[in-house]
Amino acid sequence: MAAGTGKSRSRLIVWIGAILAAILALLVVITEVSKSLERTQAEVWRLNWGFDTPEPEQLERILAYPGRDHAQYSIARYSEEAVREMLAMPDWVSIESAAGYVSALIDAFMTDLQQWYPEDREKIAQLFEQHPPVFDEQDYYLVKNESDGDRLIAVLNPDLRTLYVLESYQ
């Protein structure tokens, strides 16, 4: 009887090992699939706005509010080559004499955020003070407005190799 118990125990160990190996394999597959499904920021801009950019070398999300009144402000930094690629795209408008207009768009974005999130009014103002979109007449911008009120404002500063993107969804 002792010999039969030994065989049963070794079978049990083999089964437990096989089950653990299957679970581990499943976790690896799930992890790899989820990684492949993650979208890069450039893909998100392309899908949501038709705004085609290279993938940034560095991306900093200054603020992000999920939910009904979703809003996000990001600063993306690019290589010189990527900036040249972006400048070749037809959507860009030279800021030239429109600096006041671009500033007003950014101010309106900040005001909207403060109205949607009054509890963060000071935090929002502080974040824009600490991380303002930096531009002058030699830089570029584009605005995409959707019929449902969604809006993208992008400001490209080629000298700094920096793109400032403000998105709001309503």
Image (spheres, grey):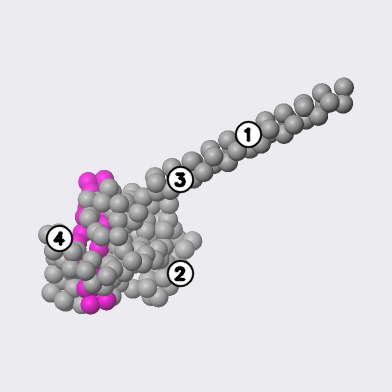
Region of the chain picked out in magenta, as a range: 141-160
Distance from Cα at disc 2 to Cα at disc 3: 41 Å
Residue 153, compared with residue 158, is above or below; it is above
Three-letter code, disc 2:
Glu
The answer to whether any part of residue 144 appears in the image is yes
On the image, which quarter does residue 11 sit in? top right
- Which residue is labeled 4 in the image? 89
Say which mark, if any, is on residue 131: none
**Crowd tier of the residue under label 3, counting other residues whose Cα lies within 10 Å: few below 14, some 14–19, many 20 or above:** few
Q: Which residue is drawn at 35% across and 54% down?
A: 40
Please, what is the three-letter code of the amino acid marked with disc 3? Answer: Glu
The residue type indicated by label 4 comes to Met
Between the C-alphas of marks 3 and 4, the distance is 34 Å
**Residue occupying image coordinates x 37% and y 65%:** 59
Spatial CA span between label 4 and label 1: 55 Å
Q: Which of marks 3 and 1 is nearer the N terminus?
A: 1
Marks 3 and 4, the one that precedes in the sequence:
3
Q: Mark 1 points at which residue?
A: 18
